Amino acid sequence: MKLFTKQHLLTLSALLLSTGSYAQHLTNAPQPYGALPTERQLKWQETEMYCIIHFTPTTFQNKEWGYGDADPAIFNPSKFNALQIVSAAKSGGFKGIVYVAKHHDGFALWPTKTAAYNISESPWKNGKGDMVREFQQAAKQTGMKFGVYCSPWDRNNPDYGTPAYLTTYRNQLKELYTNYGDLFMSWHDGANGGDGSYGGKNEKRQVDQSTYYDWLNTWEITRKLQPNASIFSDIGLDVRWVGNEKGIAPETSWSTITLKGNGNKPPMPGFLQDSNLGSGTRGGEQWIPFEGDVSLRPGWFYHAEQDGQVKTVAELFNIYCRSVGHGGALDLGLSPTTEGILHPKDVSTLAAFGKLLQQVFAHNLAREAKISLSNTRDKQSGTFGAANLTDADRYSYWATDDAVHSAWAQLDFKKPVQFSIVQLRENIKLGQRIDSVTVDVFKNNRWEILAKATSIGANRIIRLPQPENAAKIRIHVYAPVAIALSEIGLYLEPALKPVTNQKQNDAYTKTNWKASTSAATAQLTLKNSIDNNKSTFFETKSSNYIDLDFGKPLSFSAVGYLPGQDGTATGAIEKYELFSSEDGKNWQKIAAGEFSNIKANPILQRIKLAVKTTARYLRLQNTENGIMRIAELEVYK
């Protein structure tokens, strides 16, 4: 790898420092440090919040992943209104939308020329509709950015797994990149290969994720046709996955990362060592910040039974503080109903969340303070001084001399102010420089540490457990190089009225229930599957089923399965069968299917039965081999 000479760095620094309101004396500016963001990534960082919209035939099947065999005739939303959906997102403070133009079921939501399985085969608008176009136009009308996701896994296409499909997929990307205006994101994931209909063959097809899609050449299409679009996948190229579908990053989360593949092969989507996706790598080889993706509801697609499980405003704000507030971005999943609009509860929650954000960040208390600095670069307060810390400009900054790696900014107020949030930003055009900070308050004639944080980056929100009153506050910063802090914010979070969503309470109590399995070694943990404790789990390696004895016949319409909640995907059941019995010996199959996306989103899975069943015994069977873990089983009336 060619190393940068001092002259190269000076030239790069001059290019970076010459843009926008950020221009400061070039001869005195700190040298860039480590991996740096591109102009494309800077625009993405400034976006901070956007929504991804899942609305395909899968919605009408009440599933999370379609199998690729849905009749296009089911896709006919009677009240579809893209403007209602996009406007609701905007009311929440979101600045863009990513529309799922094709999910794993392979159904294209635009009239593609590449495959027959597309929206022109549906009765919606008499086969003349283009849902990608509708969302793109709604985004344009509301001033929102627009992006697309076209799933590389296609459970319908008969050519999937062969070179012919790669040509089809690339042609689909070309259509999307050519016909729908400027895109701010090209979104991808690592779900590739498995069971599907594949043109009616109903089989399992696996692909080599490290080579099949030839991603680096496939993404050249993106770079050529949509040069301003940030590419998202678990490896980037521009934005990485945070590693979970909770939308939450670890306490320390660097925007730089060193990616590793498996074995001797380079990392590719769905093919990498993912242990550092959330944390990143201090001093990592590449600047690839994270996206925290999470759905407003438990699932990505609309399910009527989840109407009482929409995230509260308080939950959304917590996610915001731990995604956007940890240096990344928040991608919130929206799920239109079968009518083609957002549920009223979703709409009102988004509006309330947007109102809260405006309320929290309307007034920066730090602007009322007299700010003194322990060191200012070359003593040039007009260029690198305190005024830059409260001017709401991401790229003006307070800088220290090169030899000063520990410094503080002190805020003095005429009278004590009350605050609960400290917001900090670095000038990331110069890299991620700061290792850590402490927030100190002056009490009892001495400085006391109030809070600590690491990995500042584009945005860091330090949320206090309770409001603090102080007249003197000090932000003490530590870095291996000269400090370049661009913003200090102090805000007071309003007290939110506790709102409890109306959860389904139709589950039977588990008094006197008994669990059993064929594995002798698993007997000790059997009770964990019905102990009402989500943190414990039943595990077996040698049995593929668990039986429940209710003690008496119960009449039930659904069954719930919660996988292990230990932060791993180990033992999560993906394919299942359900059986009922009156005597524990003769069994009747009552349901079968898959728990789609359970490894990335290990939430409670609700199996709705086709008909209500009455039985004393229930068996959940894992139809695939391997470890099976069950945190909790539920049976619903």
Image: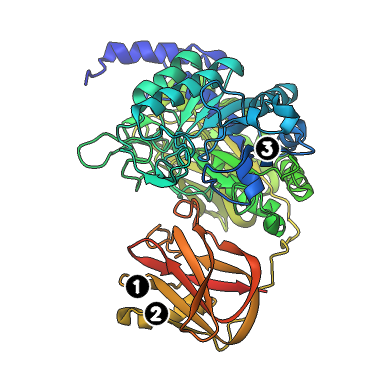
Work out which quarter of the rendered image holds the N terminus and state it.
top left
**For numbered disc 2, what is the local secondary structure?**
loop
Q: Residues within 10 Å of mark 3 (few under 14, many from 20)?
A: some
Q: Is residue 325 visible?
A: yes
**For numbered disc 1, what is the local secondary structure?**
loop
Front disc: 3 or 1: 1
Q: Position of residue 119 (x, y in %)?
A: 63, 30
Q: Is residue 35 visible?
A: no
Disc number for residue 37 = none
Looking at the picture, does residue 33 appear above or below residue 446?
above
Q: Which residue is denoted by mark 3 in the rendering? A: 364
**For numbered disc 3, what is the local secondary structure?**
loop
Disc number for residue 543 = 1
What residue is drawn where x is 35% and y is 31%? 162
Q: Is residue 518 left or right of residue 323?
A: left
What residue is drawn where x is 65% and y is 37%? 369
- Amino acid under label 2? Thr
Q: Residues within 10 Å of mark 1 (few under 14, many from 20)?
A: some
Q: CA distance from mark 3 to mark 1?
A: 59 Å
Q: Which residue is denoted by mark 2 in the rendering? A: 517
Looking at the picture, does residue 460 appear above or below residue 13?
below
Q: Position of residue 527 (x, y in %)?
A: 45, 81
